């Protein structure tokens, strides 16, 4: 059963102020992205006003697949353990054509990571955990039934008009962050448009409650016998709920297809029985689009308000939460006067590039699953026919390249020395590793302090103030291997876990210069 929760509207002191109240950060949208960002900023001692035009959570399971990188972000905020315990952990998948298995895959074949490759967990559970954490955070003022109705974007901040059940009130913000979803009212108020592709095929999502012997794997079918000529997907969720996706084609009538008397026979053919209950049904078609820029003066866009992708590969919610992870530490530095506002240009550069990567992968998957031309269909049929025979053809079969952390290649915040032939490149997301000594069991746990991290022997002696030093123990072989920490080398990791700089012969001056560049002060 969904943990439906409704929240009472409460009148804010700002509504009775004689002059518009001003806040450092106002976030619009209390979905997973806005909640994550608000919690992150509060942990960095930045007060936040978070508004949402709704008064509830728990309407439909929506996103269910949360990737390892997202879980590492949630772990930094103290939330991942409960989510993993509640969720369904998985890392393997199978791809079928008809009844025949084409291949299987493993998303995390190596050990040495605290978090699993993926969990399946209904979005309403994730939102509930985030809301509870935010409500316990004194630096976040969460206001339900507060709708952004007017916006004036100025050089020194944003002037807002907020509509409530008690009427309108004005508000000012040094920075406004729009996390208000695919239909973003903020985007509309600024007259901004998405650019990209809209796909014609429609898909049915059905969450069904049943007891079933299927393994906890991702199963995807091309042209299954129970749904001829189309595709199908099966995933397990907590509470004996199973997610089923069925391709319907471009001419499907959404109102007709979501009727229980139409949905049930389709699922009965798939399962071979009728012993299930329908929990939630939706029919959708999707778009792969984004804003030209995510930074517009004092207004920043994140999540679906900034970009949209198809659901193949679980890149929607996961990429939005990575937006929040990228933005949080930078916005905190700017608000606190430690970095210039120009630092936020790196958010725009890095996350626009990440959106393009996600859109590219999402579009390729969609073109393979629902080919739009004879040439695309011919290529797909050839790949599917050859896949059982050769590994080469398997690489062309695309049922959705699953979400991974984006690498910020060429980031203006990165520094590097040229004589590296192994380890992680600047801009790459960190790889977790177990730690034998110190106060942390895993490298990922060290990011809870909200600081940059310097890895390497003697790091404590050369790390500048505000940078957490981790010196590998003799037994930390996985850490040393993943970061090529040999012969006195050191690696600087940003607060969001991406590699900022590498040093063969580190010294305090070089590290201080890299930190200044990482924080936009150089």
Image (cartoon, grey):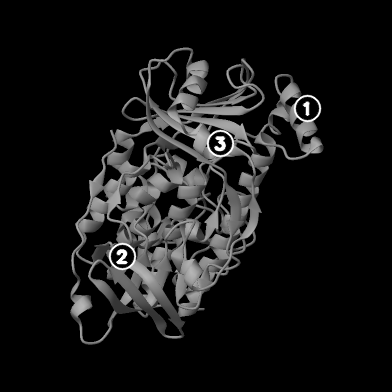
Query: Residue 258 versus residue 355: which sits nearer the camera?
Result: 258
Percent across and percent down for residue 407 are: 56, 54
Q: Do the residues labelled 1 and 2 touch (CB within 8 Å)?
A: no
Q: Quote the CA–CA distance across marks 1 and 2.
A: 51 Å
Measuring from the top left, give residue 458's x and y in whole percent: 40, 59
Q: Residue at x 49, y 20 (%)?
A: 265
Q: In what element is the residue under mark 3?
A: strand
Q: In this view, does 518 lie above or below 287?
A: below
Mark 2 sits on what residue? 50
Can I make out residue 300 in this image?
yes
Residue drawn at point x = 45 percent, y = 25 percent = 261
Q: Which residue lies furthest to the top in this view?
A: 272
Residue at numbered disc 3: 203
Q: Can you identify the residue that label 1 sits on? A: 382
Q: Distance between the residues labelled 1 and 3?
A: 24 Å
Q: Position of residue 217 (x, y in %)?
A: 47, 26
Return the disc, 3 or 2, that comes first in the chain's sequence: 2
Q: Confirm whether residue 504 shows in the render.
A: no
Mark 3 is surrounded, within 10 Å at the Cα level, by few (under 14), some (14 to 19) or many (20 or more) other residues, namely: many
Which mark is nearer the camera, 3 or 2?
A: 3
Decide: is 106 above or below 316.
above
Q: Residues within 10 Å of mark 1 (few under 14, many from 20)?
A: some
Residue at disc 1, secondary structure? helix
């Amino acid at each position: 059963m969904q943990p439906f929760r409704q929240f009472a509207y409460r009148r804010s002191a700002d509504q009775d102020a004689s002059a518009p109240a001003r806040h450092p950060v106002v976030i619009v949208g209390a979905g997973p992205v806005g909640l994550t960002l608000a919690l992150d900023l509060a942990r960095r001692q930045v007060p936040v006003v978070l508004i949402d035009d709704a008064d509830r959570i728990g309407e439909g399971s929506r996103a269910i697949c949360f990737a390892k990188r997202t879980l590492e972000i949630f772990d930094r905020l103290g939330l991942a353990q409960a989510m993993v315990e509640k969720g369904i952990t998985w890392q393997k998948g199978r791809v079928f054509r008809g009844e025949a298995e084409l291949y299987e895959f493993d998303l995390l074949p190596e050990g040495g990571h605290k978090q699993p490759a993926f969990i399946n967990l209904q979005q309403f559970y994730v939102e509930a955990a985030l809301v509870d954490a935010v409500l316990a955070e004194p630096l976040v003022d969460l206001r339900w039934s507060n709708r952004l109705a007017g916006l004036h974007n100025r050089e020194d901040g944003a002037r807002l008009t907020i509509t409530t059940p008690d009427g309108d009130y004005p508000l000012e913000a040094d920075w406004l962050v729009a996390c208000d979803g695919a239909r973003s009212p903020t985007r509309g108020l600024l007259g901004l448009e998405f650019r990209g592709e809209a796909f014609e095929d429609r898909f049915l999502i059905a969450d069904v409650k049943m007891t079933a012997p299927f393994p906890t794997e991702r199963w995807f079918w091309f042209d299954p016998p129970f749904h001829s000529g189309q595709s199908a997907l099966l995933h397990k969720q907590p509470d004996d709920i199973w997610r089923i996706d069925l391709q319907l084609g471009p001419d499907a009538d959404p109102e007709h297809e979501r009727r229980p008397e139409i949905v049930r026979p389709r699922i009965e053919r798939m399962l071979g029985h009728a012993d299930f209950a329908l929990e939630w049904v939706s029919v959708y078609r999707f778009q792969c689009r984004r804003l030209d820029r995510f930074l517009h003066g004092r207004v920043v866009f994140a999540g679906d308000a900034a970009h949209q992708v198809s659901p193949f590969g679980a890149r929607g919610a996961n990429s939005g939460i990575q937006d929040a992870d990228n933005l949080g530490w930078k916005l905190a530095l700017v608000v606190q006067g430690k970095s210039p506002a120009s630092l936020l240009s790196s958010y725009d550069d890095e996350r626009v590039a990440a959106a393009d990567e996600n859109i590219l992968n999402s579009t390729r998957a969609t073109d393979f699953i629902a080919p739009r031309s004879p040439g695309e269909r011919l290529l797909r049929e050839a790949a599917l026919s050859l896949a059982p025979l050769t590994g080469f053809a398997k690489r062309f079969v695309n049922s959705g390249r699953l979400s991974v952390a984006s690498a910020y290649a060429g980031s203006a915040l990165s520094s590097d020395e040229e004589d590296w032939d192994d380890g992680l490149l600047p801009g790459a997301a960190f790889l977790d590793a177990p730690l034998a000594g110190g106060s942390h069991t895993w490298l990922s746990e060290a990011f809870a302090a909200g600081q940059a991290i310097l890895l390497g022997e003697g790091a404590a002696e050369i790390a500048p103030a505000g940078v957490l030093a981790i010196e590998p123990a003799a037994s930390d072989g996985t850490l040393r291997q993943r970061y090529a920490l040999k012969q006195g080398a050191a690696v600087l990791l940003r607060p969001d876990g991406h590699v900022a700089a590498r040093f063969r012969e580190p010294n305090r001056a070089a590290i201080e210069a890299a930190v200044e560049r990482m924080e936009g002060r150089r």
